[in-house]
Image: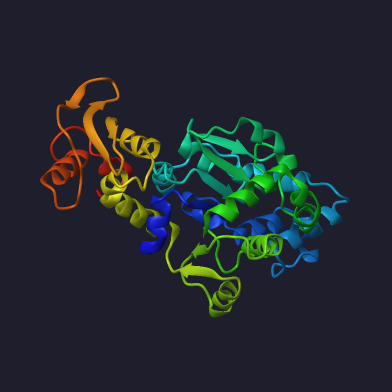
Amino acid sequence: MEKLFKLIREENVVLFVGAGFSMYTGLPSGNKLKEELINSVPDLREDLNYNDSLSKVADDIINLQNGSRNDINNLLKKLFNKTNFDNLETHQKLASIPHINSIITTNYDKTLEIAYSDNHHLIYKDNDLAYIEKSKTNIYKIHGTIDSLDSIILSKKDYNDLYKNNFSNSLIWSQIKSLLTTKTVVYIGYGHEDDNIDVITDFIHDSLGSNFKEAYLISPNLKKTKLAELNRKKIKYIDSTGEEFINSLLENINENILDDHKNKIVSDETFTKFLHQANIKPTIKKEEDSNTIVNLESKDGNNLVSNFSLSLNKESDKNKEFLDFVNGDKIGTGYTNLVGSKS
């Protein structure tokens, strides 16, 4: 995973997030949602097939109810219109990583928005693109959001309309295409039973051809048939859960953030945001080949460390001293403890 970690530290990755990433919060997987849909319409159950895909089941319910989506919408609101979660730890850890400033998701729920709080911009329709802010993480909800039921993509007809007609000509897809041709894509939260990943990767492959950067899929215990398909699409596989991957990524960033900044691998803005998680505001002196930290203060203006020059490498005493500081071993609240990469 070291190569992928370095790409993320260089701010060259866009994240593609599926339903599996939110399952630990109590939200349903695609298969569970399909079961809930069938069980929500007992009068139609004998006409529905549990072995069909989620999109086919949704299509059948809509057709059997003369085009009505009322029962489906009511279930979606019940399942996804939540703002209180007992556990959002992995989402909050992700939100603490400013190196990732674009997230594309097929999820309807609000977990990402809650985790990022005021530090995100939500995009699910073309008009939202006018308000993009570079200082915030852009969250593209390409299958809609629970706050706008008309935007939800669920049935086979919805998918056909989106991927064969509307999406190709949309401003959002133009923006996403730009991301996919300039950044490495990391799919996370998509499993072997997830129809979304097949639809998405096929659409991207057909739309971009060879004009896309390398891609990775993070998922545990994929079957050989799925691995063969990923190999055909030139998507690299990492056998890991989303939680394990985010924990390992945070540990890697913490170990390398100082050298990355000194060597200008990471931007001043991202470095500063990263330290702000620990209530630390650095003053940076830019030099031709490296950056030097000349002062540290808390965000409330109190000087923490000053009148020193910090040009860092892994063997230096100053580097160790600074790592002790941000880890909470000497002064103040530890950054590493804050983001949870160590307990």
- Say which residue appears at 68% left-offset and 62% top-offset: 199
Residue at the left extreme, as displayed = 317
**Residue 22 coordinates in the image, percent (x, y):** 51, 51
Give the colouring mode of the picture. Answer: rainbow
Along the line of sight, the residue nearer the viewer: 271 or 241 = 271
Quarter holding residue 196: bottom right
As displayed, is residue 130 above or below residue 4?
above
- Is 30 displayed left or right of 63 in the figure? left
- Say which residue appears at 74% left-offset and 67% top-offset: 49
**Residue 108 coordinates in the image, percent (x, y):** 62, 46
- Is 70 displayed left or right of 196 in the figure? right
Q: In what quadrant of the picture does the N terminus appear?
A: bottom left
- Is 307 displayed left or right of 37 in the figure? left
- Say which residue appears at 48% left-offset and 52% top-offset: 13
Residue at the top extreme, as displayed = 301
- Say which residue appears at 19% left-offset and 44% top-offset: 323
The number of numbered discs placed on residues in the rendered structure image is: 0
Quarter holding residue 230: bottom right
Along the line of sight, the residue nearer the viewer: 48 or 101 = 101
**Residue 240 coordinates in the image, percent (x, y):** 42, 65
- Is 262 displayed left or right of 195 in the figure? left
Whether residue 77 appears in this view of the structure is yes
Along the line of sight, the residue nearer the viewer: 301 or 192 = 301
Whether residue 341 appears in this view of the structure is no
